[in-house]
């Protein structure tokens, strides 16, 4: 859901980029799986409806009698020859009413289909959330790599300067060793930052392109990496939904009600069943019988005794519904806590962001003074390097805190079933940028 610095990319993401990401999300395996499950539920519902429809069967039967035998009746002997019979025809069956069996099964299947519709929507949102999470991690790794590149560069300059001064006898060896230690630490941190960057890049790429072995992000992602508008701060939307109204809750609730209808259908198996059937048969004539027959049968049947089968099956389904209801209650509590926590986190992150901004002015002034002292020989290069690194660290904190704010925006929107497609988020950010520029 986010390409790069959660912040960056959301700010400058173009509509063509958004369209690319939206298309990729819809092609993810988990989204396709949810779509297939939705289609399966649809056809399962249609199959249940079809049981009330007209069924037509054709048949052909052939029978062969015993071989010829001779039967003696006193002085008379009778020969019984081989014989065969056949008939064929067509049969119509129409289930009229099941007194609650199919009727409740249909209601149960309808709710299952509805829950699959919701699940598909939730799977798409989950995929966007995963994308934004990977983009958030990727952006932080970019910021950290940029920071470590700068610290490595300045520590290398510090090392070279210390070595020259030590070689000419101006600086003691301890200063050179200290500079070497600082450089080695920076080198180690830079290597770790680069490896983290590689990992987050691979994670993001493999999520968007699961069928590819290439781990290089496409240009529509990379070109937005270093564009950050630090003047635009995302704000949480005013929209809010109760946990019971969210898609996650509705999926569980639909499944619970579906099980209750399924229980009714099981109990209704003891009820009568009303069916209508007709049969037209062509057959070999025998004696006075005709060569065809036509029958219409209206049947009413019901179960008398089943050794407790229906009762136990109904109880099993009821226990499943009760277990799922406990999941529903826990989900409501978790969603409520998550909604409350993300709002609190946003306010904390916003205060941290403001604090880093205020600290930035102090760090800039501190660096300016230390640099001035160093240029006039009143401060060591190590003090100069420390002040410079403190300034770089503050800038890194600002970038990361802004990333945190955008991540809070995505989480809040996700937890309130708001639209979090890249196109929608881009529109929100671009409207805010244009509004603040005016």
Image (cartoon, rainbow, N blue to C red):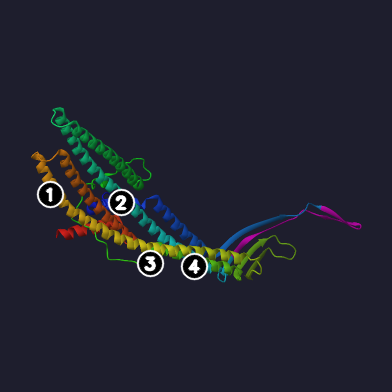
Residue 274 appears left or right of 72: left
Would you name the residue on which mark 1 appears?
365
Chain-order first, disc 1 or disc 3: 3
Residue 126 appears left or right of 84: left
| Residue 21: assigned label | 2
The CA distance from mark 4 to mark 2 is: 37 Å
Chain-order first, disc 4 or disc 2: 2
**How many numbered badges does the structure rendering display?**
4
Indicate whether residue 260 is drawn in magenta: no
The image shows residue 101 at horizontal and vertical percentages of 56, 68
Task: Bin the neighbour count of mark 4 within 10 Å (Cα to Cα): few under 14, some 14-19, many 20 and up.
Answer: many
Q: Residue shown at 15%/33% (left/top)? A: 161
Would you name the residue on which mark 3 appears?
245
The CA distance from mark 1 to mark 3 is: 52 Å
| Residue 64: assigned label | none
Would you name the residue on which mark 4 appears?
107
């Amino acid at each position: 859901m986010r390409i790069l610095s959660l912040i960056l990319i959301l700010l400058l993401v173009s509509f063509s980029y958004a369209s690319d990401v939206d298309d990729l999300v819809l092609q993810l395996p988990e989204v396709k799986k949810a779509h297939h499950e939705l289609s399966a539920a649809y056809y399962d519902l249609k199959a249940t409806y079809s049981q009330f429809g007209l069924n037509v069967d054709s048949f052909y039967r052939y029978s062969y009698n015993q071989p010829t035998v001779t039967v003696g009746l006193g002085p008379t002997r009778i020969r019984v020859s081989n014989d065969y019979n056949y008939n064929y025809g067509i049969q119509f069956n129409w289930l009229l009413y099941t007194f609650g069996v199919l009727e409740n099964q249909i209601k149960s299947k309808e709710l299952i289909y509805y829950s699959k519709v919701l699940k598909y929507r939730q799977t798409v949102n989950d995929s966007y959330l995963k994308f934004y999470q990977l983009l958030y991690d990727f952006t932080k790794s970019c910021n950290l790599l940029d920071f470590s590149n700068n610290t490595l560069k300045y520590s290398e300059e510090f090392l070279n300067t210390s070595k020259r001064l030590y070689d000419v006898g101006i600086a003691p060896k301890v200063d050179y060793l200290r500079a070497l230690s600082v450089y080695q630490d920076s080198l180690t941190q830079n290597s770790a930052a680069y490896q983290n960057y590689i990992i987050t890049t691979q994670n993001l790429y493999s999520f968007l392109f699961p069928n590819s072995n290439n781990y290089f992000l496409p240009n529509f992602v990379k070109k937005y990496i270093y564009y950050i508008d630090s003047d635009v701060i995302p704000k949480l939307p005013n929209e809010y939904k109760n946990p019971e109204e969210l898609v996650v809750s509705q999926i569980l609730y639909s499944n619970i009600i579906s099980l209750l209808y399924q229980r009714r259908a099981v109990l209704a198996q003891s009820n009568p069943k009303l069916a209508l059937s007709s049969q037209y048969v062509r057959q070999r004539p025998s004696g006075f019988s005709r060569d065809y027959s036509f029958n219409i049968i209206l049947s009413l049947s019901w179960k008398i005794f089943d050794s407790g089968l229906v009762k136990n099956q109904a109880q099993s389904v009821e226990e499943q519904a009760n277990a799922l209801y406990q999941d529903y209650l826990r989900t409501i509590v978790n969603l409520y806590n998550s909604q409350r926590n993300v709002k609190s986190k946003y306010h904390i992150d916003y205060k941290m962001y403001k604090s880093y901004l205020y600290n930035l002015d102090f760090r800039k002034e501190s660096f300016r003074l230390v640099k001035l002292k160093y240029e006039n020989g009143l401060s060591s290069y190590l003090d100069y390097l420390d002040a410079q690194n403190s300034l770089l660290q503050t800038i890194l904190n600002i970038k990361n805190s802004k990333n945190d704010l955008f991540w809070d925006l995505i989480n809040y929107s996700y937890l309130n079933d708001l639209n979090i497609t890249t196109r929608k988020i881009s529109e929100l950010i671009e409207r805010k940028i244009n509004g603040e520029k005016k």
